[in-house]
Image (cartoon, rainbow, N blue to C red):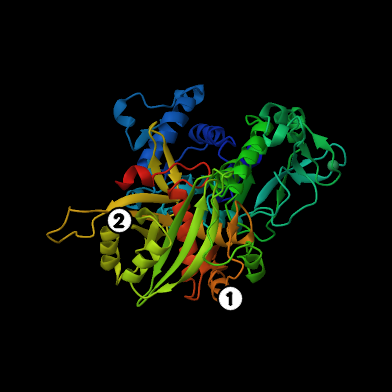
């Protein structure tokens, strides 16, 4: 593959090369060879732009430069004077290499460049990729290289890839000769929009690999293999090298933007990645998804498959929702039995309107299960308090949307009064959580403390716990997943009315062309989605309070 990428880089007519690749797909090696070649054979001022200057330091200086120093032809062109090797610039004897952060575009103008490297462009601030490419003044035969692991379908990096040649690498099946890309599964995805009957990774599920319902990973690994999509012949990784030698480039886009070549490949191609690791990562991620946590699957798709993430499918319709009806009536909680020792709790989630409040009463059970017990509306906070007491919901089980601009102060003060929890939806996808071990993990929500009395004499007296959560992540999970009967049990009462069912169908995901012509998927509603919003908050509450499997409670620790 590197051969074709270099062909593109050396091709005089190609102006832009876009590489959308998995995280372990030899990015460092590709860039190292490219840099060495540019320094020795095609010198010219180079701008290396990463998400931030720190990201430049982290990848380029810590990982790339030490490798370059081991290449004798590059080493002899390294500067010997310290002044020529600064934070922002390395002056090789043949060319300057500048380092810049995409977050400070003003520093990009200074000089015309021959090479512009856009590193991990999916991590850049929104719109930065287009801006950076515009700002850089061109040089005779200048070229832009964009290299990144993708994030979401429709983002700028993915859009630039789509406008290029969309080149895949196909191997030839040794049994039938059919040429095909290495593709993990059979279901449709962003890069493979057609489902297929056979082909991709296989493994055995039997008494040895999965005794009594639990994976025996060692046995499972032994059964991992790849299947030809045409003749169903199976290959082990021992044959990978042989298969890779048959690779040929295949351009999917019949009408690419002039002078733009784009390439995609995933970890299955890599000689450094074990196929059984890929299969195990998927199986583990899939199990987490079945438990309601989609984050591991998302990172598998983006980082291992090198594909942009888009949850497939349409939002649940009335038929899907009616299938969720359990054998109980509105107002009935799960019975407490001697045999079922699973932990349960009751919550109330509330959407605040101009002159009334809409609510859901839900019950959560360990393992991520949820029963929608009742729904309705009350006219004010006093009635809400009465409702809370009637249903035996604890104060820390009441979650109120505080995003309403007009009533925000009032909502926060009610939260102070009753120790309720304020909720706020966010456009952000994830939030960083430092862990006890010092590692930072990301979650689709964050728990903070806010002061509703700020600016008054009562400031700093009492705080409110506020949970910020990702609108996009939880909408995908509710409308494309839970309401379609996927994941842990989610049930609604047998006598749920058409009013509830209508509000749970008000959100639709629609493709939308953004200013640059790429398709992004947006959730749209017609303003009748209040119980839907309450249901979103119930799922957030489940994650925050650790009723979903695998989560740990951040609320309990920060609450008091
Ligand atoms: Zn075949």
- Does residue 46 appear left or right of residue 16 in this picture? left
Give SS at disc 1: helix
Q: In the image shown, does 284 or 155 lie closer to the viewer? A: 284
Q: Earlier in the sequence, mark 2 or mark 1?
A: 2
Q: In the image shown, does 206 or 235 lie closer to the viewer? A: 206
Q: Which mark is residue 371?
A: none
**Which residue is disc 1 drawn over?**
498
**Which residue is disc 2 drawn over?**
419
Q: Is residue 29 above or below residue 295?
A: above
Q: Contact, CB < 8 Å: mark 2 with mark 1? A: no
Examine the image and state in which quarter residue 478 appears. Answer: bottom right
Q: Is residue 82 above or below residue 250?
A: above
Q: CA distance from mark 2 to mark 1?
A: 33 Å
Give SS at disc 2: loop
Q: Is residue 242 above or below residue 227?
A: above
User: Which residue is at 81% across, 42% downward?
Assistant: 228
Quadrant in the picture for the N terminus: top right
User: Which residue is at 58% across, 63% downward?
Assistant: 492
Q: Residues within 10 Å of mark 2 (few under 14, many from 20)?
A: many
Mark 2 C-beta closer than 8 Å to ligand 1: no
- Does residue 305 appear left or right of residue 111 in this picture? right
Q: Is residue 316 above or below residue 228?
A: below
Any part of residue 470 in sight: yes
Q: x, y (%) of residue 338? A: 56, 44
Residue found at the very far left of the displayed protein: 457
Q: x, y (%) of residue 305? A: 62, 44
Any part of residue 154 in sight: no
Examine the image and state in which quarter residue 255 appears. Answer: bottom right
Q: x, y (%) of residue 360? A: 47, 65
User: Which residue is at 62% across, 43% downward?
Assistant: 287
């Amino acid at each position: 593959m590197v051969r074709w990428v270099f062909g593109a880089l050396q091709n005089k007519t190609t102006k832009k090369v876009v590489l959308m690749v998995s995280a372990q797909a030899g990015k460092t090696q590709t860039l190292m060879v490219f840099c060495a070649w540019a320094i020795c054979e095609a010198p010219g001022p180079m701008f290396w732009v990463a998400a931030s200057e720190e990201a430049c330091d982290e990848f380029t200086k810590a990982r790339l430069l030490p490798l370059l120093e081991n290449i004798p032809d590059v080493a002899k062109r390294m500067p010997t004077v310290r002044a020529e090797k600064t934070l922002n610039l390395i002056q090789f004897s043949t060319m300057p290499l500048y380092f810049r952060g995409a977050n400070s575009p003003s520093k990009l103008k200074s000089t015309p460049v021959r090479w512009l490297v856009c590193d991990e462009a999916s991590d850049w601030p929104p719109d930065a990729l287009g801006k950076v490419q515009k700002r850089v003044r061109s040089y005779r035969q200048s070229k832009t290289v964009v290299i990144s692991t993708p994030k979401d379908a429709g983002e700028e990096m993915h859009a630039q890839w789509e406008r290029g040649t969309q080149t895949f690498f196909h191997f030839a099946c040794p049994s039938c000769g059919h040429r095909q890309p290495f593709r993990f599964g059979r279901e449709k995805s962003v890069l493979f929009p057609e489902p297929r009957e056979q082909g991709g990774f296989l493994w055995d599920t039997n008494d040895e690999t999965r005794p009594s319902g639990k994976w025996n990973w060692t046995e499972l690994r032994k059964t991992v293999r790849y299947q030809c999509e045409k003749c169903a012949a199976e290959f082990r990784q021992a044959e990978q090298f042989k298969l890779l030698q048959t690779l040929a480039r295949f351009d999917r886009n019949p009408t690419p933007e002039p002078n733009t070549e784009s390439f995609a490949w995933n970890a299955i191609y890599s000689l450094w990645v074990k196929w059984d690791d890929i299969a195990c990562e998927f199986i583990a991620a899939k199990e987490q998804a079945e438990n309601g946590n989609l984050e591991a699957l998302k990172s598998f798709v983006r980082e291992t498959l090198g594909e942009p993430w888009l949850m497939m499918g349409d939002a649940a319709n009335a038929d899907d929702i009616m299938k969720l009806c359990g054998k109980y009536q509105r107002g009935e909680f799960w019975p407490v039995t001697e045999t079922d020792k699973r932990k349960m709790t009751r919550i109330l989630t509330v959407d605040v309107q101009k002159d009334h409040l809409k609510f859901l009463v839900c019950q959560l059970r360990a393992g991520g299960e949820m029963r929608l017990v009742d729904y309705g509306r009350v006219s004010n906070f006093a009635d809400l308090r009465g409702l809370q007491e009637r249903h035996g919901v604890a104060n820390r089980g009441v979650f109120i949307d505080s995003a309403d601009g007009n009533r925000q102060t009032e909502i926060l003060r009610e939260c102070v009064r009753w120790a309720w929890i304020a909720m706020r939806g966010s456009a952000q996808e994830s939030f960083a959580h430092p862990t006890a071990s010092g590692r930072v993990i990301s979650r689709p929500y964050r728990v903070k403390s806010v002061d509703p009395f700020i600016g008054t004499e009562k400031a700093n007296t009492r705080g409110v716990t506020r949970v910020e959560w990702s609108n996009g992540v939880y909408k995908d999970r509710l409308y494309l997943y839970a309401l379609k009967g996927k994941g842990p049990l989610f049930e609604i009462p047998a006598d749920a009315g058409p009013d509830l069912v209508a509000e749970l169908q008000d959100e639709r995901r629609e493709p939308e062309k953004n200013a640059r012509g790429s398709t992004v998927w947006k959730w749209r509603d017609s303003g009748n989605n209040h119980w839907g919003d309450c249901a979103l908050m119930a799922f957030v509450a489940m994650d925050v309070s650790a009723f979903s499997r695998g989560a740990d409670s951040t609320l309990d620790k920060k609450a008091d």
